[in-house]
């Protein structure tokens, strides 16, 4: 059976593409003849992780990274890493995938730490994520605080050196000499004071000794009579407490009786009993007093206007004069 040239070219092309695909994947470390499960892991940082990063368990390669993508478009804070893992490897639920970067020189790996359990993850399940800090990062965490402290110490030392430079210039030297002289004078003054104190103590030693002796005698007497003084103070306290309690009790009882009597009086007044009760509850007295006051006022006005009507001095003709005043009052009222 003979094949045409086109078929032969096509077969060689397909075979070449297949070999190219197998060679490319072989160079990537991926064996297309092996069956794999796909698992996903979500990381916040995938530093050092690229496509074809190897996946290991206890140092043994079981797969590789297929892709790294963002969980949400435009959000690089959550990155999804797709892992190809040999299908013969069973991963229990709770298995963790950790990014591990060797110190200084080396490639980043994703290390799978299988959990313990009888329930296994399925194809396209999600693993728990972890990130192991590198030696470089740990050293940087230690060195950074030391660097900050060193900068602070150097800044403080610089200030101290500047202050010392200012102190030892011409003006500072004069100030230092002046300060030493002042300190020397202070020491001399203290020496004079202590000498005077020594002299005073020598002169007044007998007096101080007598005072101390008297104080010792007083304290001894107080100590010997401590029980008697305690009893006397206790008796005085009892007397004052009794007097205070008696006076206070009597005052409280008297006040209570007075308030009861006053309360009873107010109740009687409110009920209208007695003179005060009638005055407080009956307004007839007020009306009568008001009416009498008005009539008295009118009477006083009439007396002021017509005094002759009420007061007659003449023995003869008194009645006529009163009648005359009555007529005058009637005329004025008609007007």
Image (cartoon, rainbow, N blue to C red):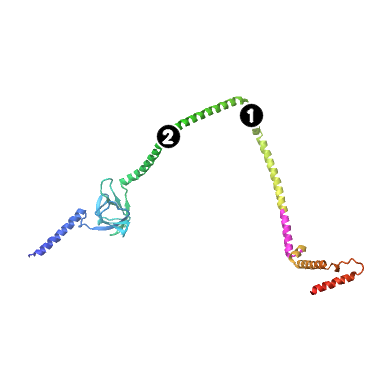
Q: Which residues are magenta?
A: 255-273
Residue pointed to by mark 2 = 167
Tell me which residue sits at (83%, 72%) in the image.
Answer: 328
Q: Which quadrant of the figure has residue 69?
A: bottom left
Residue 44 image offset from top left, x and y in percent:
33, 54
- Decide if residue 37 is in sight here: yes
229 to 68, vertically: above or below: above
Looking at this rendering, what residue extends furthest in the bottom direction? Answer: 334
Q: Nearer the viewer, residue 159 or 36?
A: 159
Q: Residue at x 67, y 40 (%)?
A: 234
- Distance between the alpha carbons at the discs numbered 1 and 2: 54 Å
SS of the residue under disc 1: helix
The question of residue 166 being in magenta is answered with no
Magenta span: predominant SS is helix
Nearer to me, 109 or 121: 109
Q: Is residue 116 visible?
A: no
**Disc 1 marks which residue?**
211
């Amino acid at each position: 059976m003979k094949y045409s040239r086109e078929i032969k070219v096509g077969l060689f092309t397909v075979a070449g593409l297949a070999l190219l695909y197998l060679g490319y994947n072989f160079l990537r470390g991926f064996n297309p003849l092996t069956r794999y499960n796909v698992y996903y892991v979500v990381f916040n940082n995938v530093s050092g992780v690229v496509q074809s990063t190897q996946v290991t368990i206890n140092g043994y390669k079981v797969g590789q990274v297929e892709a790294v993508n963002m969980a949400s478009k435009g959000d690089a804070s959550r990155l999804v890493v797709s892992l190809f893992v040999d299908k013969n490897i069973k991963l229990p639920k709770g298995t963790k995938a950790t990014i591990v970067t060797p110190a200084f020189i080396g490639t980043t790996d994703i290390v799978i730490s299988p959990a313990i359990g009888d329930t296994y993850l399925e194809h396209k399940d999600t693993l728990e994520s972890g990130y192991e800090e590198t030696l470089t990062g740990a050293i940087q965490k230690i060195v950074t605080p030391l660097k900050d402290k060193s900068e602070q110490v150097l800044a403080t030392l610089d200030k101290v050196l500047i202050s010392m430079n200012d102190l030892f210039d011409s003006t500072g030297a004069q100030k230092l000499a002046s300060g030493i002289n002042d300190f020397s004078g202070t020491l001399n003054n203290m020496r004079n004071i202590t000498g005077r104190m020594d002299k005073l103590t020598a002169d007044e030693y007998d007096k101080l000794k007598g005072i101390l002796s008297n104080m010792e005698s007083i304290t001894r007497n107080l100590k010997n009579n401590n029980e008697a003084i305690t009893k006397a103070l206790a008796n005085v306290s009892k007397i004052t407490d009794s007097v205070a309690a008696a006076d206070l009790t009597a005052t409280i009882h008297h006040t209570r009786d007075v308030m009861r009597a006053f309360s009873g009086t107010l109740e009687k007044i409110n009920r209208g009993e007695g003179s005060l009760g009638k005055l407080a509850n009956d307004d007839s007295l007020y009306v009568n007093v008001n009416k009498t006051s008005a009539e008295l006022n009118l009477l006083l006005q009439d007396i002021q206007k017509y005094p002759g009507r009420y007061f007659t001095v003449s023995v003869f003709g008194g009645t006529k004069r009163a009648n005359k005043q009555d007529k005058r009052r009637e005329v004025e009222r008609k007007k």
